Amino acid sequence: MMSTQKMNLDRFLKGHVSQQGGEITHTKIGDRAHNIPGGAYTIQISDNKTLMDVYYQEVFDKGRLSYLTEKQQIEGGPILIDIDLRYELDITKRQHKIEHIQSFVSCYMDEVLSLLDIPTESKIDIYVMEKQDVNRTDKLVKDGIHIVIGLGAHKAIQCMLRTKLIEKLPSLWNDIPLKPGTEWDDVFDEGVTKGCVNWQMYGSRKPHHMAYMIKYKWIYTLNNQVEWEPDYSFDITTFNTYDHLNKLSARYNGNPVYNLRPEHSSEYEKHREMLVKKKVKRIVVSKPSGEKLPDSSITSMEMLDKEIDNIFDGLSDGEYIVKETHGYTMALPKSYYGPGSYTKWIRVGWALANTDKRLFATWVKFSAQPGGRTSLLKSDGTFDWSRIGELKSMWDDFEFSNKNALSYRSIIYWAKNESPEAYGLVRRDSIQYYIDHTIKGVVTEWDIANVLYHICKDRFVCASISKNIWYEFVDHKWTENDSGNSLRLCISSTLFEEYNSRANSIRNKVQMMEQTNPMYEKLVDVPKKLDAVATLLKKTTWKSNIMREARELFYDSTFMDRLDCNPWLLCFNNGVVDFKEKCFRRGHHDDYLSKSTLRDYIPLDSIKDNDVTRDEVKKFFDELFPIESLRDYMWQHLASILIGINPNQTFNVYIGSGRNGKSCLVELMSLILGELKATIPITLVTSKRNTIGSTSSEVAQLKGIRYAVMQEPSKGDRINEGILKEITGGDPIQARALYKDTVTFIPQFTLVVCTNVLFELNSTDDGTLRRFRLCDFKSKFIDNPYEDEIRFPKNVCPYQFKLDKNLSAKFKRWVPLITAQLVELAFVRQAKVDDCDIVMRSTERYRESQDYLSEFAKENIVCEEGASLKKMELYNVFKDWYTTNYGRSIPKSKEVYEFMNIRYGHYNGSWKNIKISYDEDED
């Protein structure tokens, strides 16, 4: 069993102590008060068998206590579930029964099946672990369940599953008497699910706690009816720990892995981007290699504060941002660090890590505040200082692959909006620091620009130094500001007032001092210096020079890349709709939105009942789409436009002759979407590919657009299939607006064309035609319905309605209601559109009309046993037929031959058993 009989666990661990900068795969939970040392280790996969052998011998053969934890794997590891149950002190025994766990696991496995494509007859191991009894403290009673599911699943998938189960837990476990104030979000530990928290090795424990031990082992089998059949018959007394020890490890990667169902890919990507590890550039100079960070030697707030003071004392003048960020972090409210705050709490950690590594001490202090997250507290409700090692492991993993990494700017914004008073105090101290710094020596434009930056950094960004492009954050979005003119105005107003206020404050302070006071001589001349600087702030030359320096300070090289890239957000005048979180909220700086609907959003449940408006809207859509299935399709289609993804990769063609309401629908959507609707030239999809990526303002303006409506094509316009696939398939495109840099972006728009005539296709492959959706506008809006049999015969125009000449005037009144209805539908549908028969039939007819090769074969080729057909004969007949029917450039012979090979078999000297059907054959 042992890989080496002489090795023991202590010796093994000492040989694998983590070196500085190395990956920490395992930790040992320490407790200085009881002389239990902590530790951090790097154990490679190749050494895992040895670890398991010496660990088994130490813990299970010799019965010694162990305090080891394992770092989780983001991808490929087993599904790990940590259930934390908290009760009032009057609870004396375990409240959950086996039936509770079985119902939870069954519900969980059903959700697994809905997400993953699992073949029938698959068998999945389920391990359930509990402590021997509940844990009673002075303030509460605690209990818990650990579950290991033998499936290899990315942590993003586990996060999706956790979200689904939290919605169901209240009804599944409605008879479990949780301690009042306990949220189900706290019961199902999010840190374990996301992989941010280490997993206790099986048999290990926290100091002075019981270990989680195996209680049940079940097997779930997927039967031929695609239903789980659980087997609860395993006799746990026969459980062989050594045989299963590796499978109970968080680092085991031998479980089966199944593919995610395609319909869940967008949700998966969102979670995955938050978890993938990739180094990014720090915003401020990183911690010097020799600088000490808080570790397991810190056991009190006093010791931590001393460490933080040491960090602050070592800051240079250019590193004050570290102290400033600390202040804003500690100003954040309890919703960022208290119970149920994991999402906000971890984002604070990310923002701090992306600013400066020395801010780890700030994150520990932030986390250690009274009333913090329950998972970081000891049984007496105080912060568990032994968790610093785990926090450091999490901190080391705070690296991202996306460009939207949070920073100190995010923390400042959160503090400003959620703790305005505390934010104001920190801001005042910071501004005073930078103002005082400007008069320490010779006053320079750069020093003043630095003060301006710290006053306005949460409001302005320089997007291009060479082109002097500026943006200002106004009304929940970023708005381009001509040459930063608004910031220039702030120099003579806001900045002037700050210097003037500081001068008056010190002047008053000096007047109250005795001249014998040591500070008197230091401060007496300061007001004059500040007044002199204030005077400069109203001089044109100084303002121009300050603005030139400000470009470098306010410059964000990634700003334009981030702008309008989040397809799940829709900006209104009064806030932002987040379709992923299904909520309406304030706009954030890091939303990076610049386009808006230019309207206020009113949630559906807040719209005052107005039966007239509701009836008018219903009548409009009932008449516009009189066939119910088409009407339902169009509502889904319009709702999907609000979200900037196109999972069906479709191109919608609004087809129909005049007076059918196409332009009215586009006008209505234009009012709803505002800046997010664009009209684009038909050449976007009919021109050659080299137009895409060239200097083209028409293409560049499509970044962030949700509804792109093309001009009507002319008869004979032909689709460039490559470009159509590119802009509907989610591939990045490049363009450059006049006097701007080249931008690369993934299209978010739904492409639409209103037309009476259809495009011609160069290709009839499925990759092109599957993208088309022909939406027939069958109604006719005329002055006298059903009274003009010559122009509008009933058999041709069965859906005729009275023309409303004041319809456009009503649209503005309808927009709030229709917008709210579409948002609610988008929350439910998440940009998915179900195809309907009437749309697909129209599309299929279009396919057939464009499939000239199938048409040629149908009209000219017949099957006959023993017959044969040569290439030359075939192509000569095809050329004559094509010229007669289409009269345009004849397709190359290669395309015709490929079609014949697919339909009639490979050419081998001739195509066998077919021939041309000449007219005389029919006589």
Image (cartoon, rainbow, N blue to C red):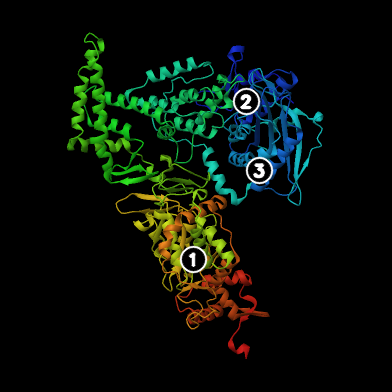
Mark with earlier residue (1, 2): 2
Q: CA distance from mark 1 to mark 3?
A: 41 Å
Q: Which residue is mark 1?
A: 653
The answer to whether one can see residue 357 in this image is: no
Q: CA distance from mark 3 to mark 2?
A: 24 Å
Q: Which residue is mark 3?
A: 257
Quadrant for residue 378, please give it.
top right
The answer to whether one can see residue 647 in this image is: yes
Residue 114: x and y in percent read 66, 48
Residue 367: x and y in percent read 51, 25
Mark with earlier residue (1, 3): 3
Residue kind at label 2, given as amino acid type: Thr
Rendered position, 837 above or below 825: below
Which residue is found at the position 27% from the left and 26% from the top? 435
Q: Which residue is mark 2?
A: 69
Label 3 sits on a secondary structure element that is loop
Quadrant for residue 200, please give it.
top right
Which residue is found at the position 65% from the left and 22% from the top? 140
Residue kind at label 1, given as amino acid type: Val
Residue 306: x and y in percent read 44, 15
Residue kind at label 3, given as amino acid type: Val
